[in-house]
Amino acid sequence: MARGVDGRDVFINDVDRRDFLAIALRLKTETPYSILAYCLMGNHFHFAIRVESTPLSKIMHRLLTTYVLGFNARREREGHLFQARYKSFLCLDDAYLISLVRYIHMNPVRAGLAPRPGDWPWSSHRQYAGKAAAAIADTRIFFDVVSPREPNVRDYERWSTGADDGFKPWPETAASPPLLRAEPDNVKPLDELVSSLFPDDASELKSDSRQRVVTQKRRLIAEAAVRNGHSLVAVAGWMNRTPQAIHRLLRRNKLIKLKPDPSV
C-alpha cells in the first residue's frame, strides 16, 4: 500500500487510474510478477503482489517512478507524489491472503465511495466475480488457494460482501516476517546462519538433490533466514532456487497455516 505525500490525492481522475493500471500491466511483461488483487482509491492504492525473481522494492520503484513522471507531466508539476516508504507485509498464510483480498475490494465501501464493491470500477472485484474480462489481476492464484468448499467465481460476490470479520491488514504481531522490501543491514549473513545450523559442507543444500533429509535442511534454513529478516528472494538466490520454491518449503512447515479459516 502506498499513500500520497501529505495525504494528497495520487489519482485525480480516471485518466490517472487508467495510466497507473496500464503501467502495472506493462511491467508484468517486463518484470514478471503477479497481481493477486488491487484497488485504486484517491490518495492511496492497495496491491497484493506475488514476486518472482525481482524484489518487490524494484517493482514498486519502477511502477511509482513511471507513474509519477506521467502524472507530473500532465499537470506541469514537479516533486514527489507518494510518501517515501510504502507499507508491505509478507503473506505466508492462506487465511490471511483470503481475508486480504476481501479487505482490498471492500475499501471503496468502507470509504463511502460505493454501496457495494462491484460498483467501484477501479479494483479487481469485478474480475473475481466473473463480471469483467481477465486483465490485471491473476485470480487463478487465489482460487487455487481456497478449497472447493470455499468461494468460487459464481458465489464470490456474495461471500466477499459478508459481515466484517475485523480483519486488519497490518497485524501488530505476526508469526510471518514483516517486510519483503529489501535486505536489512543488521542481520546475520546467510552463510554464517547456515554454518551455525549445519557446520558440515553446505554444497548439497544448493544442489539439485531431492533427498528428504536435504529438503528438511533447506526448510529449516529457509524458516530461520526469513524469521531473521532475509527476503525470500535472497534465500532463493543462496539456494539456487526460485522464490516460489522457498515459499512452498515454508508453507509445508507446521507453523504456517495451510487451511483457510472457515470463519473467513
Image: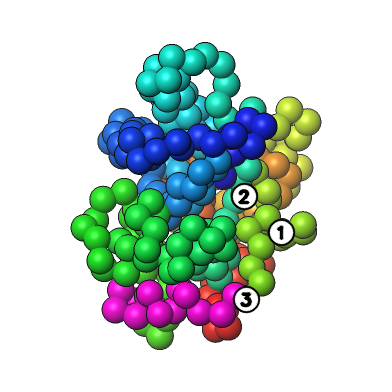
Number of numbered tags placed on the structure image: 3
Q: Is residue 240 left or right of residue 29?
A: right
Using the image as rendered, state which of residue 62 and residue 93 is in the foreground: 62
Q: Give the label on residue 89, or none.
A: 2
Hey, what amino acid is under mark 2? Phe
Q: Quadrant of the N terminus?
A: top right
Q: Which of disc 3 and disc 2 is earlier in sequence?
A: 2
Residue 154 is inside the magenta segment: yes
Tell me the distance, in whole angstroms, between the alpha carbons under discs 3 and 1: 14 Å
Hey, what amino acid is under mark 1? Pro
Q: Is residue 50 left or right of residue 256?
A: left
Q: Which of disc 1 and disc 3 is earlier in sequence?
A: 3
- Mark 1 residue crowding within 10 angstroms, few (<14) / some (14–19) / many (20+): few
Query: Mark 3: which secondary structure?
Result: loop
Tell me the distance, in whole angstroms, between the alpha carbons under discs 2 and 3: 19 Å
Q: Residue at x 51, y 54 (%)?
A: 247
Residue 108 in the image: above or below residue 12: below
Q: Give the label on residue 165, or none.
A: 3
Q: Residue at x 43, y 14 (%)?
A: 76
Using the image as rendered, state which of residue 167 and residue 205 is in the foreground: 167
Q: Which residue is mark 1?
A: 171
- Which region shows up in magenta? 151-164
- Between label 3 and label 1, give the one nearer the viewer: 3
- Between label 2 and label 3, give the one nearer the viewer: 3
Q: Main secondary structure of the magenta part?
A: loop
- Mark 2 residue crowding within 10 angstroms, few (<14) / some (14–19) / many (20+): some
Tell me the distance, in whole angstroms, between the alpha carbons under discs 2 and 1: 9 Å
Does residue 254 show up?
no
| Residue 231 placement (x, y as % from top left) | 60, 41
Using the image as rendered, state which of residue 43 and residue 249 is in the foreground: 43
Q: Quadrant of the C terminus?
A: bottom right
| Residue 223 placement (x, y as % from top left) | 65, 53
